Image (cartoon, rainbow, N blue to C red):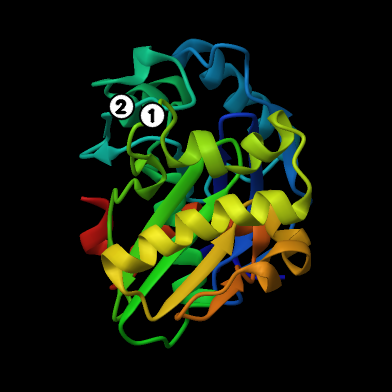
Amino acid sequence: MATNASRAVGVDIGGTGIKAGIVDLDAGELISDRVKVSTPKGAEPADVLEAVKEVLQTLEAPDDLPLGVAFPAIVKNGRTLSAANVSSSWIGFEAEKFFEHGLSRDIHFANDADVAGIAEVRYGAAKGINGLVILTTLGTGIGSAMIYDGVLIPNSELGHLQRAEHKKDAEGYAAYSAMERDELSWEKWAKRLQWYYDYVEFLFSPDLIVVGGGVSKHSEEFLPLLKLRAPIVPAKHRNNAGIIGAASLAVPVPEALPAVK
């Protein structure tokens, strides 16, 4: 097993679930069971903090391990600036200080899709790729990470691209939750994804698109249905990318430093 110096804990807070695990930072792999609880209804700060305490207690990780926390919001200097799938109380909230005080320890705090991007650039499908890589996480919403020549461009929020003359934005129309809500087949959902990725490709001309989130474990059901100029591939770490990325940011690494401050 990895030594404490090469291990860290990652916590991935999502709109529907909160997951945590211990990560081997050399291999970029979980070396513990993945612990998960449901995100509290309403996702108010105090309730989310208690859920994070619960997953950490269940995980039984040593207290001396660095801790990284990923959150589904724009994050700048430890403050959350948006709240698409959590309580509006998080808007303008000093989230990093709140968690550090509540957990009685230092943490490293960042956007959930951004940390998934870090996991894929360090250990996964985007490793060694030059040019522009766009990672999207398909789940409750659509998260995104933009990585250029291995460096993260934080807080891209491409899930909120607007649809002309429609009330729902991109994630309201094409997220995995929209597929479940509207009871779509893989084929019908893929048509919505085709619109979304066509839009992203037109705006940014990426060299590679990586698809993460829980549904990526079923990537063979929908990725072959998409026709794009850029290659589109599933994230190597699937739904564990947030945990791995959050843990990797808990220990300073050169390519991550510009992305978190």
The percent coordinates of residue 54 (x first, y second) are 67, 25
Quadrant for residue 60, please give it.
top right
Question: Circle 2 sits in a helix, a strand or a loop, which is it?
Answer: helix
Q: Are marks 1 and 2 in contact (CB under 8 Å)?
A: yes
The label on residue 230 is none
Asked whether 26 or 148 is in front, the reply is: 148
Question: Circle 1 sits in a helix, a strand or a loop, which is it?
Answer: helix
Asked whether 199 or 41 is in front, the reply is: 199
Please identify the quadrant where the N terminus is shown.
bottom right
Quadrant for residue 177, please give it.
top right
- Residue type (three-letter) at the residue carrying disc 1: Glu
Q: Above or below — where is 93 with respect to 131?
A: above
Which residue occupies 56% across, 55% down?
193
Q: Residue 219 vs residue 4: left or right?
A: right
Asked whether 98 or 222 is in front, the reply is: 222
- Is residue 14 visible in the rendered structure shown here? yes
The percent coordinates of residue 100 (x first, y second) are 38, 29
The label on residue 100 is 1
The label on residue 97 is 2
Q: Residue 1 vs residue 196: left or right?
A: right
The percent coordinates of residue 73 (x first, y second) are 37, 35
- Residue type (three-letter) at the residue carrying disc 2: Lys
Work out how far the residue at label 1 is from the one at label 2, CA to CA, in angstroms.
5 Å
Count neighbours of disc 1 (C-alpha within 10 A) and say few if under 14, some if 14 to 19, many if 20 or more: some
